[in-house]
Amino acid sequence: MDEIYLDNAATTPVSEEVYAELMDKYKNVYGNASTLYGLGRQARAVMEHAREIIAKSINADADDIIFTSGGSESDNTAIMQTAIARQSLGKHIITTAIEHEAVLKTCEALEKMGFKITYLPVDEHGNISLDDFKAALDDQTILVSIMMGNNEVGSVMPIHEIGEILKDHQAWFHTDAVQAYGLLNIDVNRDHIDMLSTSAHKINGPKMIGFLYKRNGINFPSFVKGGDQEEKRRAGTENVPAIAGFGKAVETITEAEKAHRQAKYFKFKQYIAAKLTENGVEFEVNGDIDEHNLNHVFNIWLKGISTYVMQTNLDLAGIAVSGGSACTAGSIEPSHVLVAMYGKDSPRISESIRISFGRYTTTEDLDKLVDAITKISNRVKGVKL
């Protein structure tokens, strides 16, 4: 049985282009990029080429890109090190209630260290209020960390508007762009972003490699202690093959390709919704079917069917979907995103699945998904056809 993979918000398969790049660099570029002899200089040249490609993708300077092990390390670094470096200016941080755990758990740790954290609420569409944000901002605020797009329902935050508000404020502005990178047009200068986190494995690149963009003039000590790699900003021998693979993944996603993927995924959501409705499946969308959202994410409430039952039965049918964020897989805790949107007593919390599309998703995959959901729903509810 062929597996139908519809959990691309969790991770994506490595593309053929990236795979070829990885194999070439693993075999032929094995020097330590921090050494001065020929093999080291070769490795550094490969790494700096990838850094240039990645910097260009967000309209940044190459010197402002720091390679990390992924989105979680980048988020942790930006938030924790900013707090430590700037606490003499204030101990207030603003974030949202629907951030990734890498942000929320770091903020929780800072609360235990005496920092005040404001968690902005969201509405039933997964959106924050700019009025709430303005009301929370004060002269003690040293950091604002708000994700670009949500990984469970796809809502996109008003990043440009927040950047405009903060451009004359002391607070540094960080955004977790792990889900948005490769789909939205990102310009750190246009949007006044000081720090930005992302990860290669969300865009058909290798796992355990990401970057933190840190604007020139944003200074704090290295989060990972050790050597002087990454201009003393992140210790540890650089993973040159993975960095090269990351660069190749970014290189394949032009602005036109981003727009194409968003449009294609939007049609996928409309297609699934129409087919489920046609088949008489009782469901509602969590959030919106909105072309301006991250359209690779489609979260639906399947009324009266537990997430566990639906996800397990889809797995038995060879279809991979998620019950929420991959980083809470196996947890009995409800989705904090759906709780923030609908309240802890809503049946949506325990009856929803997340479907997420990727580069290799086809309409045939969606037909098989809809057919399976329909059959499972009818069987669970005892519907006789």
Image (tube, rainbow, N blue to C red):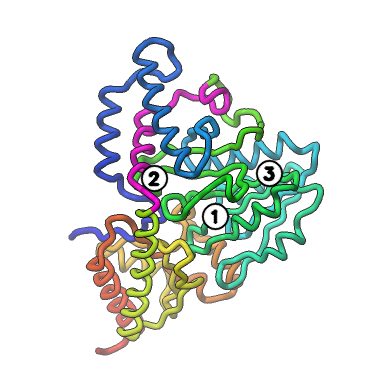
Q: CA distance from mark 2 to mark 1?
A: 17 Å
Span of residues in magenta: 229-255
Q: Is residue 61 above or below residue 36?
A: below
Q: At numbered mark 3, what does the secondary structure look like: helix, strand or loop?
A: strand
Q: Is residue 173 magenta?
A: no
Identify the residue at horizontal 34%, vertical 69% (top origin): 268
Amino acid under disc 3: Trp
Identify the residue at horizontal 36%, vertical 58% (top origin): 7
Residue where numbered disc 3 is placed: 172
Residue 371 visible (yes or no): yes
Q: Nearer the viewer, mark 2 or mark 3?
A: 3
Q: At numbered mark 1, what does the secondary structure look like: helix, strand or loop?
A: loop
Q: CA distance from mark 2 to mark 3?
A: 27 Å
Residue where numbered disc 1 is placed: 148
Residue where numbered disc 2 is placed: 201
Can you tell which mark lies on residue 173? none
Across and down, in percent, residue 182 comes to 42, 50
Q: Is residue 244 magenta?
A: yes
Identify the residue at horizontal 72%, vertical 52% (top origin): 117
Identify the mark nearer the N-term, 2 or 1.
1
